[in-house]
Amino acid sequence: MSEIKRIAVLTMVRNDDFFLQKWVEYYGRELGKENLYIYYDGEDQQIADFCQGTNACVHPKIGTQVVSAEKARLKFLSEKATELFAKGYDLVIGVDADEYIVVDPKLGAGLKDFLSQQKIDVSLSALGLDFGQRLGEEGDLTPDATFLSQRRYAQIGTRYTKPSIIAKPCRWGSGFHRVKGHNFHIAKDLYLMHFGYADSKILKARLGDADRVAQGWEKHILKRSRTIRYATEKKAHDFDRWTRFARICQTWCRPPYALNKPAMFELRIVVKLPKRFSNVL
């Protein structure tokens, strides 16, 4: 039996308490709140009450423009991960506040037990699922119920197949999308679920957030909001069949401009999650 590993998870957040509350609830249950490290981006932010028991702190704001700020943010988080390894952690997970790494419930294993059984050289990736909202079928996303009982449709996205889990000090690229100088490995039965564009009401609020607009996020948000259109309009395919295909495809296919990132022939495959996931997140 594998030794249980000591695992930390970190994030940097700004004006995102809706998703952060679920983040704290989920990772706190899976890994222990004492192993959660949250950095609020900007001294105009206040630490939310639900962060009690975690390692949450306010950090001076990193940059004002999206590209330069994102590079500085990941440099900062990579350095924090290095510090956590020095404190004795075996693994460090880096994710945004709207990203949740979930083990397929068919295994009957929690995140900590699952990762403790994995042989990880440098990094491990979960298969990316970008959740949308099927308009006319799914209502507003609420914290009063599990996310996966409210959202069932997701695009299989190479953008969210990230080397989020690292086993030694290294340098994440912007958005955790790659580990510089290293390849990636996609774990079977492990998923990174992204909910940042899974609700039209929240999306409109983000577009009305003067702070995000000032940083240059408006174009990015509009581009990624296509996920709602895909979830609404595209046929939903079988989850197990197409995630199996995607894992193989993304393992072997790479974009010519970034050989340590996954590719999938620009396919836009929407899948419907099985009911077995409903109570996980």
Image (spheres, grey):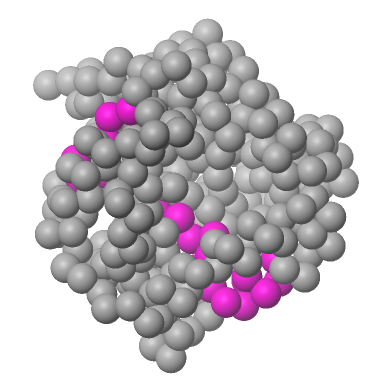
Instruction: Name the quarter where the C terminus is drawn.
Output: bottom left
Which span of residues is magenta-colored? Answer: 184-206
Quick check: is 204 in the magenta stretch?
A: yes
Quarter assignment of residue 267:
bottom left
Q: Nearer the viewer, residue 213 or 133?
A: 213
Q: Nearer the viewer, residue 7 or 175?
A: 175
Residue at the extreme right: 44
For residue 73, side relative to residue 116 (left or right):
right
- The relative height of residue 190 versus residue 258 in the rendered view (above or below) is below
Q: Residue 193: x, y in percent?
A: 40, 54
Q: Residue 116: x, y in percent?
A: 26, 26
Q: Residue at x 14, y 47 (%)?
A: 107
Quarter assignment of residue 66:
top right
Q: Residue 234: x, y in percent?
A: 33, 78
Q: Residue at x 77, y 70 (%)?
A: 208
Quick check: is 67 in the magenta stretch?
A: no
For residue 176, side relative to residue 274 (left or right):
right
